[in-house]
Image: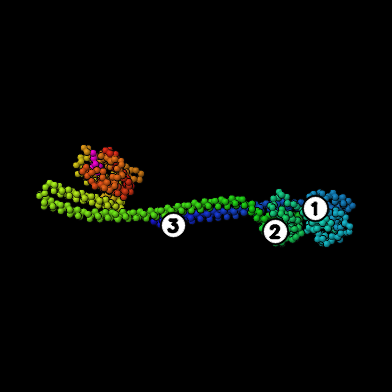
Amino acid sequence: MQFLGLIWSRKFVPAAILGVAALSIVLVWVSYAVETANDRKRALGAAEIRLEGVAQALAEQVERTLSGLNIASLYLRHAWRHNHDQFGTVVDALRPAAAPAAELNVMVNDADGWMEFSTYPEPSAPVNFSERQHFLIQKNSSDDQLFVSQPVLGKLSNRLMIPNSRKLLDAQGRFAGIVVVAIPADSLFSLEPHLNLGARGAATLIGMDRVVRAAAANTPGTAPEPGTATSPDRPYFQAPDGVFQAVGSVDKADRLFAFRRLKEFPLVMVVSDTVADIEATTLPHRRELAVFALSVSTAVAVFALMLAHFVHTLSARNRALDAKSEELSQSNAELEQFAYVASHDLREPLRMISSFLTLLEKKIGAGLDQDGRDYLNFARDGAVRMDRLVLDLLEYSRIGRGRRPNAVVDLGAAMDEVRANLAAAISESGGKVEVLGRLPTVAGNAHELTRLLQNLVSNGLKYHTPGQAPHVSVSAARDGEYWMLSVADNGIGIAPEHHERVFGIFQRLHSRDRYEGTGIGLAVCKKVVERHGGRIEVLSGEGQGAVFRFTLPA
Ligand code: ADP
């Protein structure tokens, strides 16, 4: 407990309040950081799923177009060989059906690369394609497959075209040239708005030879140009599908990529969106969180500062109060010490006055007239009264000088002693002192508590109505954590305006010739009760008897 008091008295509590507040604020912001990091993670997770979907949709779109072209190439090869004369008609009929969304051009080259047929207007001079990649690949490979070439600027169309070629075979199965079904690179696939690729989203169709076949982007300058080569260490050259994060080769932005390889062709569809745009979707929630965290921390800080200030002021006031009460009890102790010493030393000269007055009376008493003898008696009475006053004062100052009032005191036994001490006064007045019920046992100083009861009972006997026998009754009742004791009499009573005053030292309501006394008795009572942790009061009216009530801790 002392330790607690010590840390309380130091500046510990305000510092602790501020510390706890600071910790709470740190916690709020840590939670904010964790929550926003989770937000980002959630947004990236959702974007991964979205991009995978787009990659799959576009891959299928391309696959469908290329499958159509593949069937067309087979059909045209067959027509070239078996229906040579009608070939132009066959081509015209086929074109809208084979590639409904694109401009389809058909060309046939012979085994040396010379153009034999074309849907383009007839050129003025013969055109040779033997140096074109697709011609060389078809001529030199044994595979009989549709080859999706790198985009080339069409010699006749002057557009970026993707020539898709298939070899022609003669009756002996030898290479007899190629049939080409070419479509513009930008008609392989398109970014429909419903694909939801993002403002800076891009899609690229890349061959396993690393060359970009076609690209589409919602913002120009974010996707690689068709015909350019991509870096070989990209994950889409290693796996059939997947997701990864990397810096975009064109705009150098941090991007989230998803890719899916085509089933029938050595091509991969790669789509991406910027991480910044993906994370920007969490901005409103992050802003809300930040406002919330800021409000909470401000409220905590303001509250803690106010509380710390309040506690600081309070403890400063407490310290000042402690110092004052320390000062007060010291000066009280000094005063009591002074009163004790003074009254003690006063009795000595008083005793001398009394004894010399007695000697004087013996020596010259007989020779004195009545006036002289009266004077001597007055002088001796004065000395006796003064001795009484000094004795009472001495007793008043002695209260509280002894040990702490914590002995077990039986108030019933104390009352027995009071009755014995007051036996003469009781019989002289013809009065009665009775105890109603049982009196309790309390913690206190036996001598002081007996003195308290005796002063109250003797006052009850003393201030009785003339011509009426005094009747004093003492009783006790439990009142919460206290005992409430009452000493009631049927005497002259006290007018309400004097109820406070009678407990003051030397305060008397009557002259000495009516009621003998020094005016210290009730001051002693008040001091004893308060020292025991209780309160005392009087309930009375003039001529109505008086009830002195005091409490003592139970
Ligand atoms: P003392 O009895 O020596 O005068 P106290 O301090 O005991 O001094 O009492 C103070 C004054 O209170 C008394 O002078 C008296 O006027 C009044 N008083 C005390 N007790 C009673 C009582 N029981 N009935 C009426 N008056 C009382």
Depth order, front residue of 339/104: 339
Query: In the rendered structure, which disc, 3 or 2, sits on the residue that comes first in sequence?
Result: 3
Q: Label 1: which residue?
A: 69
Residue occupying image coordinates x 60% and y 55%: 37
Dot in front, 2 or 1: 2
Q: What is the distance, in whole Å, between disc 2 and disc 1 at their CAs?
A: 33 Å
CB under 8 Å between discs 2 and 1 = no
User: Which residue corresponds to mark 3?
Assistant: 11
Q: Earlier in the sequence, mark 2 or mark 1?
A: 1
**Pointer 2 local density, CA inside 10 Å: few below 14, some 14–19, many at least 20:** some
The nearer-to-camera label among 3 and 1 is 3
The numbered mark, 3 or 1, whose residue comes first in the sequence reads 3
Residue 311: x percent and y percent? Answer: 44, 53
What span is in magenta? 459-465
Type of amino acid under label 2 = Asp
Classed neighbour count for the residue bearing mark 3: other residues with Cα under 10 Å, few (<14), some (14–19), many (≥20) = some
Mark 3 vs ligand 1: CB below 8 Å: no
Residue at the far right: name it.
85
| Image location (x, y in percent) of residue 386 | 21, 50
Q: Judge whether residue 205 is colored magenta.
A: no
Q: Nearer the viewer, mark 3 or mark 2?
A: 3
Which numbered disc covers residue 251?
2
Which quadrant: the N terminus?
Answer: bottom left
The three-letter code of the residue at mark 3 reads: Lys
